[in-house]
Image (cartoon, rainbow, N blue to C red):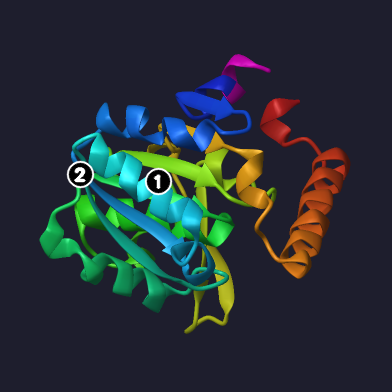
Amino acid sequence: MSLFATMRAPHTIVFSSGQRHALPIYARALGQRALIVTDERMGASSELAALVDGLRAAGISVVVFDRTLPEAPLDCIDQCVAFRQSFGPDLVIGLGGGSCLDVAKVTAILLAHGGSPRDYFGELKVPRLVLPLIAVLATAGTGSEATQVAMVADSERLLKVGIASPQIIPLVAICDPELTLSAPAGLTAIVGADTLTHAIEALTAERALWMR
């Protein structure tokens, strides 16, 4: 891996079965009031309940937003920000697939700097540090846990738009394969196709001019 790639990766990547149980250790070093961003499936899971118990046992206050929708629509992000803005989180934890992690990223921006997601469309629009981010991957899909990009769905433009900034690279990425075992078969198949597409794209895309 090049130095450039290393600089654009999470500070800490944890990969192994059972490593989700290490979440309280990393969270305790980053904050005391955690907002967990996830979806309805994970929100009702025993895995989330165990993670919340572990965080609270470590002295971390926790609230859970479990209404993330596929493709991360903007109104979903607005709901997440409004959901617990009064709670005053100092840490955002994304749990789930790419949409959950992307909503967590944009929420961390808005809680730190305010405004609308549209204010940050494009590259390098995030002015300073956002709330600390931890990404806990529950699918094998987009790789959002290790990138500087959040993709959101803009209903006005009827397309997906990216927010790209080194500020939204998660500080910690926890990749526990056991979290994928409870995913429905259909979701597993879709995620597999998505992962294959990303791999083919990486192999066939032209190198950028500035890299030549």
Q: What stretch is highlighted in magenta?
A: 1-5
Say which residue appears at 86% left-offset and 39% top-offset. 203
Quadrant of the rendered structure where residue 159 is? bottom right
Residue 51 numbered tag: 1
**Residue 133: x %, y % from top left:** 36, 41
Front residue of this view, candidates 15 and 124: 15
Q: Report the residue at 57% width, 56% height from top.
A: 98
Mark 1 residue type: Leu
Horizontal side, residue 150 vs residue 159: left or right: left
Question: Hey, which quadrant is residue 2 in on the image?
Answer: top right
Instruction: Tell me where residue 90 appears, x and y as whole percent.
Output: 20, 44
Q: Do the residues labelled 1 and 2 touch (CB within 8 Å)?
A: no
**Is residue 11 shown above or below 72?**
above
Badge 1 marks a residue whose secondary structure is helix
Q: Indicate whether residue 155 is drawn in magenta.
A: no
Q: Tag 1: Cα neighbours inside 10 Å, few (<14), some, or many (≥20)?
A: some
Three-letter amino acid code at the position of disc 2: Asp
